[in-house]
Image: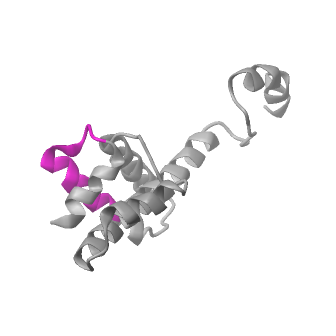
């Protein structure tokens, strides 16, 4: 497998800045789920933080301006983020590994999806966090 990866390296370089050899077939999918899970949990936390900032009397524009300086922004549709959280939870269940924060975040995304925000970007979890 490693040899095939190295033979294809020039093709990978043509379409991406980085490429990583992940070993066995399926490991890249697992890596993607882990990264999406982390992103989903962070976005849910941002949504709760924005709701808390609102309640604390902070200006949303100030919070958002600071957030724009970070790598926390996401254009991924909420329904896709929730799907990835669910897949990560399923993978963890198969490994008997607890993910309580991811499970709670998944519930936030599911509720926002039920409210009709599935096609909005993942930041729509903010709407759910406010109510």
State yes or no: residue 10 in magenta: no
Could you tell whether 110 is left or right of 90 in the image? left
Residue 59 placement, left or right of 96 = left
Quarter-wise, where is residue 18 in the image?
top right
**Number of numbered discs visible in the structure rendering:** 0
Vertical placement of residue 101 versus 26, above or below = below
Indicate the position of residue 101 as horizontal and vertical percent values.
40, 70
Q: Residue at x 25, y 71 (%)?
A: 54
Q: Which residues are magenta?
A: 105-120
- Residue situated furthest bottom in the rendering: 56
7 and 48: which one is in front? 48
Residue 58 is left or right of residue 95, and the answer is left
- Quarter of the figure with the C terminus: bottom left
Quarter of image, res 52: bottom left
Which of 29/48 is in front?
48
Q: At which x and y percent is residue 43?
A: 40, 58
Residue 107, image x, y percentages: 26, 61
Question: Is 21 left or right of 71, judged from the image as shown?
Answer: right
Q: Residue at x 34, y 51 (%)?
A: 123
When the figure is inspected, residue 101 is found, relative to residue 35, above or below; the finding is below
Residue occupying the point 82% across, 34% down: 2
Q: Main secondary structure of the magenta part?
A: helix
């Amino acid at each position: 497998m490693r040899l095939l990866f190295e033979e294809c390296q020039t093709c990978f370089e043509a379409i991406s800045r980085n490429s990583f050899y992940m070993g066995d077939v399926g490991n890249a999918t697992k890596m993607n789920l882990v990264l999406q899970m982390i992103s989903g949990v962070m976005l849910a936390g941002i949504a709760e933080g924005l709701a808390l900032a609102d309640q604390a009397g902070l200006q949303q524009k100030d919070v958002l301006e600071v957030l724009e300086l970070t790598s926390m922004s996401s254009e991924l549709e909420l329904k896709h983020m929730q799907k990835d959280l669910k897949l990560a939870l399923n993978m963890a269940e198969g490994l008997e590994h607890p993910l309580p924060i991811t499970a709670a975040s998944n519930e936030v995304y599911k509720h926002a999806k039920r409210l009709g925000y599935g096609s909005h970007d993942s930041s729509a979890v903010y709407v759910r966090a406010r109510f």
